[in-house]
Amino acid sequence: MIPYQILLAAEETVGEAEETVNPILPVANELFWGAICFFGLYALMKFVLLPPVLRVMDERERRLRADREAAEAAETGAVEAQAAYDARIAEARAEANAIIGVARDEADAYRAERFGEANAELAELRAEATAEVIAAKTAALAQLRGGVASVAVNAASRVIGKDLDLSGELAAIEDYVNQTSNGEARP
């Protein structure tokens, strides 16, 4: 019996369904109120809510543009500052090289002057030393000549067997030694 009652209830519902309104299709008063709400919200958005949003967006766009321009100006300034820095560094290097060149020239001149003075002093010392050597050589030769002359006279007097006079024979010995030292030897 339950299936029969379900079938009867379904037939009654179908008969009533023909009389009921379709829930998908709007009713005229719903269309009216929907249109009023739509245009009201449209006017509210267009004239009240949208202008501040657009103003904020424009302001943000202006700030971004200004920030971009400031960044480009800062970048340009940085490039100019780098160029100025490089120019100053190059100028400082050129000045340093000039100072070093002048100092090097002065040092070379000072060194040449000192070498000249040292060479002059060495030449003077050599001349003095040469003079001292010549004087010492002359004195040694004179002493040697005197010693050799006395030895030669003593030896000759012993060989001959009679005493020879040193002062008389000294002139002959000096003459012989002078000729021998000049490369003129007597036979």
Image (cartoon, helix red, strand yellow):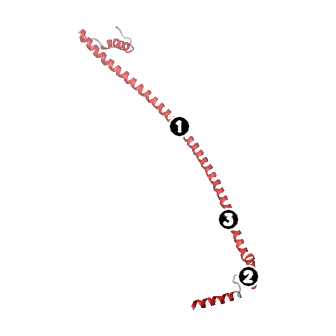
Which residue type does callout 2 highlight?
Answer: Gly
Q: Is residue 172 above or below residue 64?
A: above
Q: Residue at x 56, y 41 (%)?
A: 101
- Circle 3 sits in a helix, a strand or a loop, which is it? helix
In the rendered image, residue 159, in percent from the top left (x then y), is placed at 24, 10
Which residue type does callout 1 highlight?
Answer: Asp
In the rendered image, residue 114, in percent from the top left (x then y), is placed at 50, 35
Q: Which mark is residue 64?
A: 3
3 vs 2, front mark: 2
Which part of the image, by quadrant, shows the C terminus?
top left
In the rendered image, residue 90, in percent from the top left (x then y), is placed at 60, 47
Which part of the image, by quadrant, shows the N terminus?
bottom right
Q: Residue at x 61, y 50 (%)?
A: 86
Q: Is residue 180 above or below residue 5?
A: above
Q: Which mark is residue 108?
A: 1
Q: Earlier in the sequence, mark 3 or mark 1?
A: 3
- Name the residue tied to disc 2: 34
In the rendered image, residue 98, in percent from the top left (x then y), is placed at 58, 42
- Circle 1 sits in a helix, a strand or a loop, which is it? helix
Q: Residue at x 74, y 77 (%)?
A: 42
